[in-house]
Each structure stands twice: as structure tokens, then as C-alpha cells.
Image: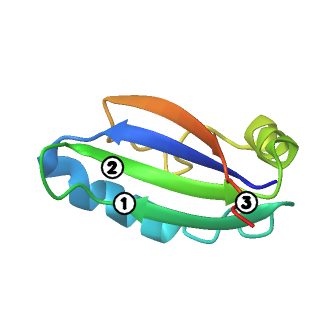
Amino acid sequence: MSIVVINALKVPVVAGSELEARFAARKHSVDGSPGFEGFQLLRPVAGDERYFVYTQWATREDFENWRAKRTPHDPSGQAPVASGMDLLEFEVVDLG
């Protein structure tokens, strides 16, 4: 059963374009990871300043394996754009 992991990043409005540029520069960095099924960066349009980083994985184990191996900081050495984050996890429901 696939899982979806959403990282909710609190990003000041003035820093949104910088966040988008950083993700664009690394958009294929997870592609070869076992069990990785997809990625989207969701931009806020009304009522919230959080960006959502949406990833889908074949299994929870695939996500945990990737998470254990990843480098949590921007390789460019730049300061973080987000001022806070929440991690949300969901199972994809098979509706038959």
C-alpha cells in the first residue's frame, strides 16, 4: 500500500520564490530512490503561508530508508528558507 508524506513548510511570502528555485534545482534528486513514486511542491494561494512538499512512496519502509540516508541540509550551504515544518503521513486508500 502506497503512503503519502507531506512536509508542511512555513515560508515567509518574500521567500517563496527562493524556496521554489531551490526545489527546482534539485527536483530529480529523489527519483532513483527505491519505492519513490512521485513528488509535487504545492504553493499556497490563500489563507496560509505554508508550502506543502508532497511525496508518494510504495511503502513506509521505502520512505524510512530514504529518510535515513538523505542529507537534511541544502548542499549549497545556504541558510534555510522555511521557519518551521510539520510532517504529515497518510496511507493511500484503495477504493477498489
Q: Nearer the viewer, residue 34 or 80?
A: 34
x, y (%) of residue 12? 18, 41
> Which is in the foreground here, disc 3 or disc 1?
3
* Dot 1: element: strand
Q: Residue at x 37, y 39 (%)?
A: 9
Q: Earlier in the sequence, mark 1 or mark 2?
A: 1
- Picture quarter containing residue 32? bottom right
Mark 2 and mark 1 in contact (Cβ < 8 Å)?
A: yes
Label 1 to label 2: alpha-carbon separation: 6 Å
Question: What type is the residue that disc 1 sits on?
Answer: Leu
**How crowded is the residue under tag 1: few (<14 C-alpha within 10 Å), some, or many (20+)?**
some
Residue 64 percent coordinates (x, y): 80, 38
Q: Amino acid at mark 3?
A: Asp
Residue visible at 73% across and 60% down in the picture = 94
Left/right of residue 85 with respect to residue 90 in the rendered view: left
The residue identified by callout 3 is 94
- C-alpha separation, residue under disc 3 versus residue under disc 1: 24 Å
Figure quadrant of the C terminus: bottom right
Q: State the mark number for residue 51.
A: 2
Task: Decide which of tag 3 and tag 1 comes sooner along the chain.
Answer: 1
